[in-house]
Amino acid sequence: MPWPTCDVCNREDAVGVGASVFGAISLAYGRECLKQEAEACWLLAWLFSELGPDPDVYAAWVWTWKTFVDGKYITARAYFDTFGRDFFDTAEAPPAEAPAGE
Ligand SMILES: [Zn+2]
């Protein structure tokens, strides 16, 4: 069985497998991602989709983590601010019809 690659950045060898802080799932983590306190962006995307579109209701500790996107580490909040709208169905409801008789 080959040694796993880091599930966060997919670019470094993992140094171990452990539970994520964001849910009941285990990931392989590399040394740099552990040092950066980074979690997989797809896990953050899942968390955001579960918690909803208002970041002000999130527990403060969520924003203390980072993730790895497009070759660099960014804060969880930067990830939310950049990609958050993609995680929610923001389509507006169709306009209500004008009341009859006007
Ligand atoms: Zn990594």
Image (cartoon, rainbow, N blue to C red):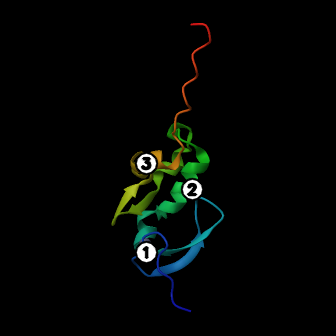
Amino acid marked by disc 1 = Asn
Neighbourhood count class around disc 3 (C-alpha, 10 Å): few under 14, some 14–19, many 20 upward: some
Q: Residue beneath label 3, please?
A: 77
Q: Position of residue 68 (x, y in %)?
A: 40, 63
* Image quadrant containing the N terminus: bottom right
Secondary structure at numbered mark 3: helix
The label nearer to you, 3 versus 2, is: 2
Circle 2/circle 1 CB separation < 8 Å = no
Closer to the chain start, of discs 3 and 2, is 2
Location of mark 1 (residue): 10
Q: Tell me the kind of residue under disc 2.
A: Trp
Above or below for 95 versus 81: above
Residue 88: image x %, image y %? 53, 45
Q: Quick one: label 2 or label 1, which is nearer the N terminus?
A: 1
Q: Is residue 42 left or right of residue 68?
A: right
Q: Which residue is mark 2?
A: 46
Indicate yes or no: mark 1 CB to ligand 1 under 8 Å.
Answer: yes
Disc with the residue nearer the chain's start (1 vs 3): 1
Q: Residue at x 41, y 45 (%)?
A: 81
- Check the image and name the residue furthest to the right: 24
